[in-house]
Image (cartoon, rainbow, N blue to C red):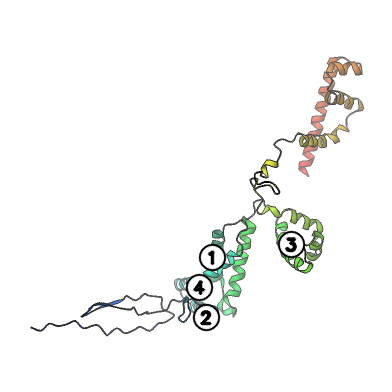
Amino acid sequence: MTTMQPQPRTDVAPSTATSEAPSVAATPSVTTASAGPTVVPPVATSVSPSRVPGTPSGRLTGQARSDRTRELFTQALGASEEVVQQLHDQVIVMHLELAHAEAKRYRSRGVALDDLRQVAALALTKAANGYDVTSGHDFLSYAVPTIRGELRKHFRDHGWMVRPPRRIQELQARINHADGELSNGLGRAPRPQEIAEHLDEPLASVTEALASDGCFVPASLDHPAGGGDGTTSLGDLLPLDDADHRASEARLLLQPVLRHLSERDRAILSMRFHEGLTQREIAGRIGVTQMQVSRLLGRILGQLRDDVGDVSDTGSDS
């Protein structure tokens, strides 16, 4: 009796790879030979639009990526909204690593890197939707400034712990750039006056911007104090209650209103609150009764309260 042996398949024809078709993974074919099953390597049917054969990583780089990007945008001209979105998605995927690289340039500045990557990705999407291929310019010349602009806007709007005025924010960015240029030229850190002359800005504005430098990422009160043993924090150095400071504020507030009092009223206040005399002792000095001293003090203090209220209202209106 004769047995039939199965013959291995030899009719697998490779498909022609095209850059326009989406990437589809081929299913490996299994044939049965006399020695057992044999796996035939899969045959690729297309090339992913973000990859190109012949490169170690398979990714489009340099001019190849630029040409493929222009090809995708050209295909989107006159296409339906759904097709345009699909083509734009391919462009975004091709340039996503570039957006993440731009975000990485702004790390360690008080904003989480993951947030910066998200902002950069959204900016890349914005650039892809706004790019006009008929302008003749390369996509990167439009996308990179868009990504950097959105990152800087995110820092300006959301990165400040203590938000200074807009003009100070913008001047601070110019100062940082000028500081590097002047340091290279002078061989040392530039002085505020030199920065002001370089930027053609008033010295007062430059000084104000330099003073607000810590507003972006202020130091924590738990941060170790410099020059110590590491166990003392900045918060430990702050006074809990400064009586002298409160007294200074009171003197500054009372000084203008005390000028409105008569010499006798000022003398009564000095005896009562500076020398610490009782009403009876004050009465003996000025030759009046204790009841009259009590009434005098009530009138003087009432006048001071009214005058201090007028000064406070004037200060708040200004």
Query: Reading the chain from its start, which is encountered first: label 2 or label 4?
Result: 2
Q: Can residue 47 be seen by looking at this rendering?
A: yes
Q: CA distance from mark 4 to mark 3?
A: 36 Å
Q: Count residues near mark 3 (Cα–Cα under 10 Å), then give few for <14, some for 14-19, many for 20+.
A: many
Mark positioned earlier in the residue sequence (2 or 3): 2
- The answer to whether residue 126 is seen in the rendering is no
Distance between the alpha carbons at the discs numbered 4 and 1: 12 Å
> Where is mark 1, residue-wise?
121
Q: Is residue 303 left or right of residue 170?
A: right
Mark 2 secondary-structure assignment:
helix
Looking at the image, residue 93 sits to the left or right of residue 176; the answer is left
The kind of residue tagged 1 is Ala
Residue 13 lies left or right of residue 318; in this view the side is: left
Residue drawn at 40 percent across, 82 percent down = 17
Quarter occupied by the C terminus: top right
Label 2 belongs to which residue? Answer: 64
